């Protein structure tokens, strides 16, 4: 009996180790949705498609589910129908696995009043800062980062960010809320694609102990795909940087292995709810420009 219990404990320990490995390293989920986000008017429909990229999977069955069926319903063939104003997350899961992909659906009333606004930022955005030290970063080739912001929010590439230093990021752009007030910053950098742990990639976004994207204690993977990982974390600014007390803001980091780039977004605390932050993170998509 004791031997049986020991054997069961060994199996359980091995299973926990495997689960922790996948959770901490951000191993790709091997499933992709054709749309990371979309906006529909009440009554409109959209066909979503999910592709399984892992050929070794024995099961190929995908199950679609809506987080809010009353806002946007979805059939098991991926047809989404907008029911009422609001937002919902459509999840495509591979049965028997943890592999999944998401699409954020924003539903408006059909009069141009969107519940969320898809925006796109092009990188690199400013070659005037190019020098011999950062040439490898700015010569990476143009790519785009798209994500969905709350209604009334927008990206401002020309925002004055001189008082908001973000070490480790290039081509920084401002994010303004519905009142036009600066509510966040987004930028990019490059990394060695041989690196398998996304957390190590983001360690360079720091200024000693004064500024850092905390990827030790607050790092939480939101979605994984063949091309990379997106996660949420906390961003710390010291009292010396803020001029008053230490600030703990929200961070969203996303790496793309195909391009060898990562993007980082700092969103100031108090501006967004946890659900809105998750919506933004889930909608992040990085693509190479044609």
Image (cartoon, grey):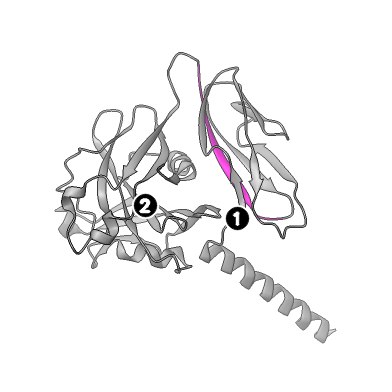
Locate the N terminus and report the quarter of the image it occupies: bottom right
* Residue 100: in magenta span: yes
Indicate the position of residue 288 as horizontal and vertical percent values. 42, 46
Indicate the position of residue 275 as horizontal and vertical percent values. 47, 40
Residue identifier under label 1: 29
122 shown above or below 139: above
| Residue toward you, 78 or 15 | 78
Picture residue at 73% right of the left edge, 76% below the top = 11
Picture residue at 47% right of the left edge, 44% below the top = 278
Q: Which mark is residue 263?
A: 2
* Residue 111: in magenta span: no
Q: Residues within 10 Å of mark 1 (few under 14, many from 20)?
A: many
Q: Check disc 1 and report its element: helix, strand or loop.
A: loop
Please give the range of residues in magenta. Answer: 97-109
Q: Is residue 167 left or right of residue 219?
A: left
Q: Check disc 2 and report its element: helix, strand or loop.
A: strand
Q: Main secondary structure of the magenta part?
A: strand
Indicate the position of residue 202 as horizontal and vertical percent values. 36, 62
| Residue toward you, 1 or 176 | 176
Picture residue at 36% right of the left edge, 52% below the top = 263
Seen from this angle, which residue lies furthest front? 290
């Amino acid at each position: 009996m004791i031997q049986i219990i020991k054997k069961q404990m060994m199996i359980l320990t091995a299973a926990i180790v495997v689960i922790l490995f996948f959770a901490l390293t951000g191993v790709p989920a091997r499933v992709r949705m054709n749309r990371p986000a979309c906006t529909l008017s009440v009554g409109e429909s959209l066909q979503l498609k999910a592709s399984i990229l892992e050929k070794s999977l024995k099961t190929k069955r995908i199950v679609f589910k809506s987080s809010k069926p009353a806002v946007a319903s979805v059939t098991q063939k991926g047809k989404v129908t907008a029911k009422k104003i609001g937002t919902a997350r459509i999840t495509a899961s591979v049965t028997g696995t943890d592999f999944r992909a998401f699409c954020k659906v924003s539903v408006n009333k059909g009069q141009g009043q969107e519940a969320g606004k898809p925006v796109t930022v092009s990188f690199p955005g400013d070659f005037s800062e190019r020098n011999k030290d950062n040439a490898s970063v700015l010569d990476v080739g143009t790519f785009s980062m798209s994500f969905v912001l709350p209604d009334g929010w927008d990206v401002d590439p020309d925002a004055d960010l001189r008082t908001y230093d973000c070490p480790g990021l290039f081509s920084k752009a401002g994010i303004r809320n519905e009142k036009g007030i600066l509510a966040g910053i987004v930028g990019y950098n490059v990394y060695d694609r041989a690196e398998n742990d996304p957390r190590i990639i983001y360690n360079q976004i720091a200024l000693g102990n004064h500024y850092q994207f905390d990827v030790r204690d607050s790092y939480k993977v939101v979605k994984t795909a063949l091309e990379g990982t997106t996660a949420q974390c906390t961003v710390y600014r010291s009292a010396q940087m803020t001029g008053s007390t230490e600030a703990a803001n929200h961070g969203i980091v996303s790496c793309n292995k195909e391009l060898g780039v990562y993007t980082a977004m700092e969103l100031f605390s108090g501006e967004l709810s946890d659900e809105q932050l998750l919506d933004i993170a889930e909608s992040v998509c990085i693509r190479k420009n044609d």
